[in-house]
Image (cartoon, rainbow, N blue to C red):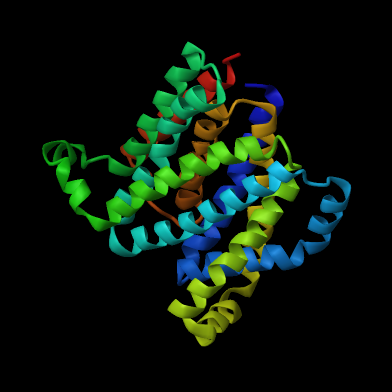
Amino acid sequence: MTGLSLILVLLSSLTHSTWNLLLKRSGNKEMFVWWMLVSASILLAPVGGALLWLYPIPPPGWWLLLASSVLEICYVILLGRGYARGDLSLVYPVARGIGPMLVPILAVLTLGERIELPAILGIASITIGIYTVSWWGRFGSILRQPTALLKDSGTRYAILTGLTITLYSLVDKKGVEYIQPFLYIYLIALGSAIGLTPYMLRNYGPASLGRELRLNIRSIVAAGILFFVAYGLVLTAFSLSRVSYVAPAREVGIVIGVLMGVFILKESFGRGRLLGSGFIVLGLTLIALSP
């Protein structure tokens, strides 16, 4: 993994964790994310227009944009339903842990990437770290009744969310071969905002959506800009390095999120979070040192 890619991933993780902190503090998560996409689409329209003029998109790029936008819409809906039906401590690690496990395998099979041994160990360490942070103290009950996870509807939605993350990571890797990364994420935000609008209006109505905007307009605008920056940076990293390295490495954002939770939200920092964060940092180091 190149030094520049590592810096981009770290900056992306910081901005991603920051907008997720704003999301965590919000009331209705689905409405907040939709308004975030809408605000990014409106505020950054001049940037998107300029980039589109400077970097015309060839036909394959439009198809990849369409596929990624559809997957992004599925991601928002599935994750929201997972959080609504299951515990955060179960849904989050399943949703975020599947990608680092599957993306490298599928990248080798579909994109012809090669993964070096240190990176394999790093990917495994990051995956272990994700589940350690979230499931510390519960491993015994989970191992005794692993099928109980699948009986939980929230976990089933989390699995579908993880598969969606895997697919859009692979699509985005190909997408940035045809489209400038920041233009790519702007058009995905625009397409996702438009595609989600009927769903949001049907489920919440204009009055509830308007109230969410009035209550959280500053956080929504800030999150929209941070979303654009975070994903633009990681897409740039995709264009410079292997997706099998970048996709797991970006999960270092979990460590940043843990630190934000401790110092900003005053959450506890137990042994599980400490150990899991150590695994994630070790994994990132191994990936960073891999050729």
Snapshot quadrant of residue 178: top right
User: For this view, does 105 lie left or right of residue 141?
Assistant: right
Q: Does 260 appear above or below 30?
A: above
Residue at (67%, 22%) from the top-left corner? Answer: 2
Horizontal and vertical percent position of residue 222: 66, 62
Q: Does 72 appear above or below 168?
A: below
Q: Nearer the viewer, residue 185 or 139?
A: 185
Quadrant holding the C terminus:
top right
Residue at (69%, 49%) from the top-left corner? Answer: 62
Residue 182 seen by the camera:
yes
Report the residue that reaches farthest toward the left: 144
Residue at (49%, 14%) from the top-left corner? Answer: 118
Horizontal and vertical percent position of residue 21: 52, 57
Residue at (69%, 28%) from the top-left corner? Answer: 240
User: For this view, does 2 lie left or right of residue 125?
Assistant: right
Q: Nearer the viewer, residue 60 or 229?
A: 60
Q: Nearer the viewer, residue 280 or 105?
A: 105
Residue 230 seen by the camera:
no
How many numbered dots are placed on residues in this image? 0
Q: Does 205 appear above or below 274?
A: below
Snapshot quadrant of residue 258: top left
Horizontal and vertical percent position of residue 69: 58, 54
Report the residue that reaches farthest toward the bottom: 207
Quadrant holding the N terminus:
top right
Horizontal and vertical percent position of residue 114: 54, 16
User: For this view, does 70 lie left or right of residue 9?
Assistant: left
